[in-house]
Amino acid sequence: QVQLAESGGGLVQPGGSLRLSCVASVSFVSISTMAWYRQAPGKEREWVAVLTSGDITKYVNSVKGRFTISKDNTKNTVYLQMNSLKPEDTAVYYCNVKKIVPGGMGDYWGQGTQVTVSS
């Protein structure tokens, strides 16, 4: 079992920045991929950014050049640096990790942190 705890959300003006953090209860050595998703009111949850065990990063087109996913293995923490925030970035942001477990792949989620971009 993997437990994830997100933090760093809040209210920010358009053009501002936030850094989200997600602390995992297990070492990243056993983690296959780490990702951030978001869900805006009335919309489905969407993938935002992913960081693989091989340190490959990918982003949804709408955040490319503005968001950066990174990790600190010593702290079992994955980050999402969000710059040049727009009102359409408003959503609950969720941390997700996939871990190889006996018989398959475990899929784990945090509780979410609210990000609101508004003037």
Image: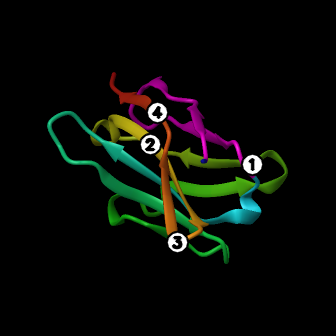
Q: Residue at x 36, y 30 (%)?
A: 117
The residue identified by callout 2 is 94
Badge 3 is on which residue?
103
Quadrant assignment, res 60: bottom left
Q: Are marks 1 and 2 in contact (CB under 8 Å)?
A: no
Which quadrant: the C terminus?
top left
Q: What stretch is highlighted in magenta?
A: 2-26
User: Circle 4 sits on which residue?
Assistant: 111
Of badges 3 and 2, the one in the foreground is: 3
Q: Give the alpha-carbon distance from disc 3 to disc 2, as whole Å.
A: 25 Å
Which callout, 1 or 2, points at the residue further toward the start of the chain? Answer: 1
Mark closest to the chain's N terminus, 4 or 2? 2
Residue 84 visible to the viewer: no
Name the amino acid type tagged 1.
Asn
Q: Where is residue 34 in the image (x, y as percent from the top left)?
A: 56, 59
For marks 4 and 2, give the one nearer the viewer.
4
Confirm or deny contact between disc 4 and disc 2 (CB under 8 A).
Answer: yes
Where residue 23 sits: x, y (%)? 67, 40
Assess whether residue 4 is covered by the magenta stretch: yes
Secondary structure under tag 3 reads: loop
State the residue position of label 1: 76
- Say what secondary structure mark 4 lies in: loop
User: Image check: 90 left or right of 76?
Assistant: left
In the depicted view, which residue is nearer to us: 26 or 41?
Answer: 26
4 or 1: tag closer to the N-terminus: 1
Near mark 2 (Cα within 10 A), the count class, few <14, some 14-19 or many ≥20, is many
Please tell me which residue is depicted at 76% across the width and 64% down the height of the picture. Answer: 29
At a point 79% along the width and 56% down the height, the residue shown is 73
Q: How crowded is mark 4: few (under 14 residues within 10 Å), some or many (20 or more)?
A: some
- SS under mark 2: strand
> Where does residue 69 sit, x and y in percent of width and height?
58, 57
